[in-house]
Structures are given as C-alpha cells and as structure tokens.
Image (cartoon, coloured by chain):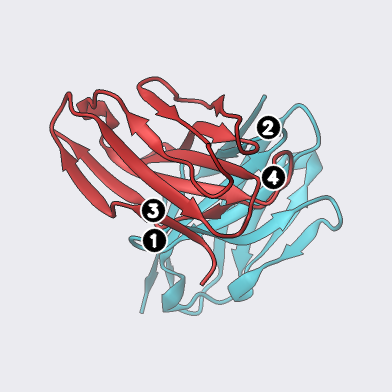
Chain colours: A cyan, B red
C-alpha cells in the first residue's frame, strides 16, 4: 500500500520569500516520488522526481526536493518565490503500477 | 507538438445520458491512465491500460468503462452519468507501465452532470 499526505492545502508567500511545501509518504516498498505542478486550467506538469540516485533532487523552475527516508518526507522548496509560481502542487508516490497523489497545495504569491 | 489531446474541453450533461471522453497520444507510449480530479481529493485513478489490448481498474472505477483498441487512443465512457461524476477528467500516458515511470498529462475535460 502507498499513500501521500500533503500538509497544508494553501500556502501564501511573498515574492522573493522561501517556498516550502510539505509531503509525507507511506510505502511498503522503496518508493519513487514525484512533484507535479498544475497551472490554472491546465494539466499536470512534472517538476521533479526521486528515483533513489540522489537524495537531493533538482527540478525545473528553481525547485528542489530532498528525500528523507527516516522522516518519510519529500518536501519541495524554492529559495525565492516568483509570481509565476502561483499554482497547485501535487506530491505523488509510485510503488507499483500506479501513481498515488496527495490532495494538493495551492500556492499564492503576494507582490 | 507531441503530447496528449483530450476532447471535449468541457461538457454539460444530463443525468442518465451516455458520454465518451476521448484521449489520444502521439508519443507511442505503452501505458495510459484516466484520473478524476476533485477539490481536496487530488487525482484518483479510474482505469489504466499497461499496453494496447489490456485494461485494469483503478481506485474509483464504478460507473466508468474503458477500451484500448490501439496504442494511441484510450476513451473513457460513462454509461449512465450521475451528478457525482461531475469532475475534471485527466488522461495521462507513460512510456512504460510500472514503478517510477513519469506520466504525461493532457489538458483535461471539465464535465458537469446535472
């Protein structure tokens, strides 16, 4: 069995501030972990994925995530938020044939 | 541009009507998926297909059916729509089925059942 919990359904940050989105997973086998972004009225786009090669994963648009097995976490960060980062972000885990998604976190960026 | 197309973009449907959502990919991916997205629930898998000619049930398959006659197309049919099927539907594909494969998503179909 596998599941994902995203802590916080909404996050509001000021432009230039740190973005931190929290994701915890459960999996009975070593997981693959993903972060996807969804801009308004669009489909999901892959930001980054963890496949056990390195615990710190760099993605597109300046985002990165760190896999911490001891904490079963895969939190997403970006050092400096930009207005274009306003979107919904989904964490997902893959431990068998399918992806299991978290409920999502909506990010708003204040000027 | 390579990718996934979905049709229609949006639809309002009377309860009890039959509806087919279309999905086509041109990336020659083996695996395809249908998800529904509902507020506060994220995306939930409805049905999937690991390769042409095979299909499987996901997390929320009731009231939906799929077919995979060829590699490119993966239609989703609601035999008799109900209001609880109001949702945004996303089709996705991956090069291979199985653990760790990146899924690529279409733009979605917004369906309202009245």
Seen as rendered, the residue at the extreme right is A53
Residue linked to disc 4? A73
| Chain at tag 3 | B
| Mark closer to the observer (3, 2) | 3
Q: Quadrant of the C terminus of chain A?
A: bottom left
Q: Residue A64 location, x and y as percent?
A: 67, 65
Q: Earlier in the sequence, mark 1 or mark 2?
A: 2
Question: Quick one: SS at disc 2?
Answer: strand
Query: Is the residue marked by circle 4 packed among few (<14), some (14-19), or many (20+) residues within 10 Å?
Result: many
Q: Residue at x 62, y 68 (%)?
A: A63
Residue on which the image places disc 1: A42
User: Spatial distance from mark 3 to mark 1, Cα to Cα?
Assistant: 12 Å
The foreground one among A67 and A32 is A32
Identified at 59% across, 35% down, the residue is B49
**How many angstroms separate mark 1 from mark 2 (CA)?**
28 Å
Which disc number belongs to residue A26? Answer: 2
Image coords of residue B14 (percent x, y): 13, 32
Residue A36, position in %: x, y? 55, 56
B12 with respect to A72 (left or right): left
């Amino acid at each position: 069995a596998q599941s994902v919990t995203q802590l916080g359904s909404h996050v509001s940050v000021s432009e230039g501030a740190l973005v931190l989105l929290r994701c915890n997973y459960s999996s009975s086998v070593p997981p693959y972990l993903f972060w996807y972004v969804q801009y308004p009225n669009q489909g999901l786009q892959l930001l980054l994925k963890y496949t056990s090669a390195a615990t710190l994963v760099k993605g597109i648009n300046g985002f990165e995530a760190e896999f911490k097995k001891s904490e079963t976490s895969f939190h997403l960060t970006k050092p400096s938020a930009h207005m274009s980062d306003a979107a919904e972000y989904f964490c997902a885990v893959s431990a068998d044939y399918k992806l299991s998604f978290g409920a999502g976190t909506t990010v708003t960026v204040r000027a | 541009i390579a990718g996934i197309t979905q049709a229609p973009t949006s639809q309002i449907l009377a309860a009890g009507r039959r509806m087919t959502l279309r999905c086509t990919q041109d990336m020659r991916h083996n695996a395809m998926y249908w998800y529904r997205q509902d507020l506060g629930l994220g995306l939930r898998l409805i049905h999937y297909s690991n390769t042409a000619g095979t299909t499987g049930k996901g997390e929320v398959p009731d009231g939906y059916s799929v077919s995979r006659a060829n590699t490119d197309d993966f239609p989703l049919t609601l035999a008799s729509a109900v209001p609880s099927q109001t949702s945004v539907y996303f089709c996705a594909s991956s090069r291979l089925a199985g653990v760790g494969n990146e899924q690529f998503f279409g733009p979605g179909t917004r369906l309202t059942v009245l």
